[in-house]
Image (spheres, rainbow, N blue to C red):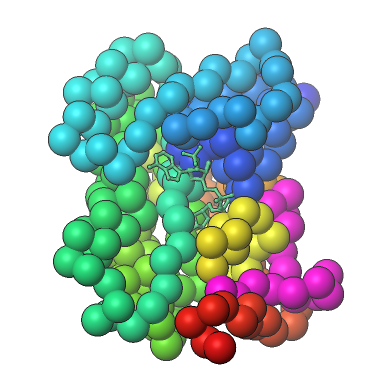
Amino acid sequence: MTASKLFLITGASSGIGRAICERLLEDGHTVAGIARDFSKFSKKHPDFHPVTLDLAALDALPQRLVELTKQFASVDGLVCCAGRGQFGSLEEFSYEQIRALMDLNFTSQAYAARAFLPGMKQRHRGDIVFIGSEAALSGGRKGAIYSASKFALRGLAQALREECAKSGVRISIINPGMVKTDFFKSLNFSHGKDADNYVVPEDVAAAVAMILAARPGTVFDEINLSPLKKVIHFVKTEKDE
Ligand SMILES: NC(=O)c1ccc[n+]([C@@H]2O[C@H](COP(=O)([O-])OP(=O)(O)OC[C@H]3O[C@@H](n4cnc5c(N)ncnc54)[C@H](OP(=O)(O)O)[C@@H]3O)[C@@H](O)[C@H]2O)c1
């Protein structure tokens, strides 16, 4: 039995983030989760603390994060999972859409890490786990801004991993391929029905649990976790007709 710890998860209300929360609660930890809408997170648990917050509202975010570092002062680990998918050629994105996707997928997660890192460094321990993407490993058609946001996250993770080692803070990134979540609800492609075509959120949660439970003094720098078969199913939209 491992000692109970306190973890903060962004993107906690659904999909991968929710599975991470549920896994860490099952493992006996206390979990605080950030998202805008917890109606999707039906499971009530005495050790789960929902924090309703729009991470894309960047102007207000630093102050809210300062408050959270006080509320959860002894946090042992931060999992930066919030994000969304938006795909299309560059010129299909408005300037505002480019900024909004970078704001949520990259800048808000960098702000969260920025807020909690000083406390972890002071305590000489802590974990920050970023949820990247296979789109952080190579760019693909229609993925320019999504890939850019995830490359940025991965660059941040790699640099922090070097920067934080001496302070006893471990930095990791997981790059999943297609995971069966609501991520695809608003997209014109998905993994399809074959179970070999997708990862389930619980697989990513298991990788996070493994990272967090690793022997002190060791770090999982990066984990790439993909479905066995990489098949993309395109859904026909009215635009394609
Ligand atoms: N599914 C995949 O195939 C896949 C593959 C690789 C990487 N990823 C990454 O995994 C992460 C989680 O995605 P998912 O697949 O689990 O999708 P999901 O089920 O749609 O979950 C996204 C999470 O992010 C939160 N979120 C979105 N916008 C937010 C905002 N403005 N403020 C606060 N929270 C916000 C959502 O909560 P609210 O809507 O309640 O705010 C939700 O909890 C994302 O970073 C995604 O890029 C997903």
Placement of the C terminus among the 4 image quadrants = bottom right
Residue 4 occupies which quadrant of the picture? top right
Compare residues 186 and 212 and report the one nearer the observer. Answer: 186
Q: Horizontal and vertical percent for residue 214? A: 61, 44
Query: Is 83 rendered above or below residue 74?
Result: below
Query: Is 151 rendered above or below residue 169?
Result: below
Span shown in magenta: 188-203
Judged left or right of residue 178, residue 202 is right
Q: Horizontal and vertical percent for residue 18? A: 63, 39
The residue at the point 70 percent across, 16 percent down is 45
Q: Horizontal and vertical percent for residue 74? A: 42, 17
The residue at the point 46 percent across, 63 percent down is 85
Query: Is 149 rendered above or below residue 30?
Result: below
Q: Horizontal and vertical percent for residue 105? A: 36, 54
Judged left or right of residue 143, residue 15 is right
The residue at the point 45 percent across, 32 percent down is 36
Task: Report how many numbered discs are placed on residues in the image.
Answer: 0
Q: Is residue 127 visible?
A: no
